[in-house]
Amino acid sequence: MTFAVRAVVGLVYLFLLAPVIVVAGASFDGGKSVAGRAFLQFPPSELTLYWYENIQPRLWEALGVSVSVAAVAAAAGTILGVPAALGIVRGNLPGKTLIATLLRAPLQIPFIVIGIAFLQTYYFVANAVGFGLQGTFAGLALGHVFVATPYVVGSVGAALQRFDLRLEEAALSLGAGRWTTFRRITLPIIMPGIYAGALFAFMVSFGDVPISLFLAGASFTTLPLEIFHGMEFDFDAAVLAISTVVLLGSLVVLYFIQRIVGLDVLLRSGGNG
């Protein structure tokens, strides 16, 4: 690799990582008080954990809501997406192309439109049967499952497209039943695609703002939405601290995924949606 290529690659990495480095570094700055407000700087003039020690409970609660909703969305998306991908790739369903298009439709619709659509649907159901999901955890999770499922369908479908059917045929010819063949042969091979779809679904749900803006309740909210509201009128330095905590937590999760599955496998499985 020539020096010019290394320089270009280094500049690309710097461009991608610079905002994250600035946020994480500034979170350790003591801050200068101007008109009663703290202004942080990068590089930090003095290292301190003050902002980490003063993260408001509402931010921790919002983080818990975000993780819970994202986990539900990823799990439900996986339960729905794996059979859907199997049906699309291997089934002989009439209108299979149309079904595949409809399953990918949430990826083409702006999230703010999805949020409005779900909110209006909840109001319609509430007026019809007297039970509404607006402002509830279930209602918020349902909206996130809607946008999370296509990621699982795409990643598992990509894994199935590359699947060697002769492996299943060999297992069946040796006396294994269809369920045993699926459990012992098919499922382990497509598992990287399932991991990739679930991971992407979790990330999309965790970082969502537009859908949560319409479906979150007054008594609970997600972390991105809490940060959005917090930055809308004033700057809270603790936001940088909680953001750095999320960043470090994400790196830990990615490290264990790399050890268990391998990020290269995840990217190959999830990149062909």
Image (tube, rainbow, N blue to C red):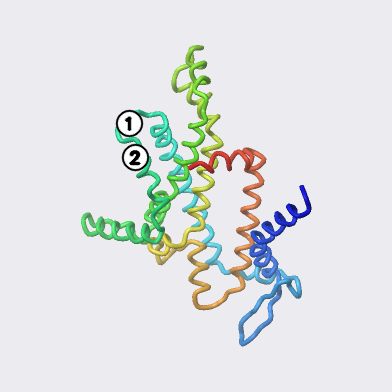
Residue 179 lies, with reference to residue 194, above or below; the image says above
Q: Position of residue 64 (x, y in %)?
A: 52, 57
Q: Residue furthest top?
A: 174
Q: Residue at x 41, y 58 (%)?
A: 111
Q: Residue furthest left?
A: 128
Q: Amino acid at mark 1?
A: Leu
Q: Position of residue 69 (x, y in %)?
A: 47, 53
The residue carrying mark 2 is: 99
Q: Tell me if label 2 and label 1 are in contact, CB under 8 Å.
A: yes
The residue carrying mark 1 is: 93
Q: Amino acid at mark 2?
A: Ile
Taking depth in this image into account, of 8 and 266 the one nearest to the observer is: 8
Q: In the rendered view, does 112 fall on the left or right side of 18? A: left
Task: Describe the element under mark 1 as helix, strand or loop.
Answer: loop
- Label 2 and label 1: CA atoms lie apart by 9 Å
Taking depth in this image into account, of 86 and 40 the one nearest to the observer is: 86
Q: Position of residue 144 (x, y in %)?
A: 42, 52
Mark 1 closeness class: few <14, some 14–19, many ≥20 residues within 10 Å: few
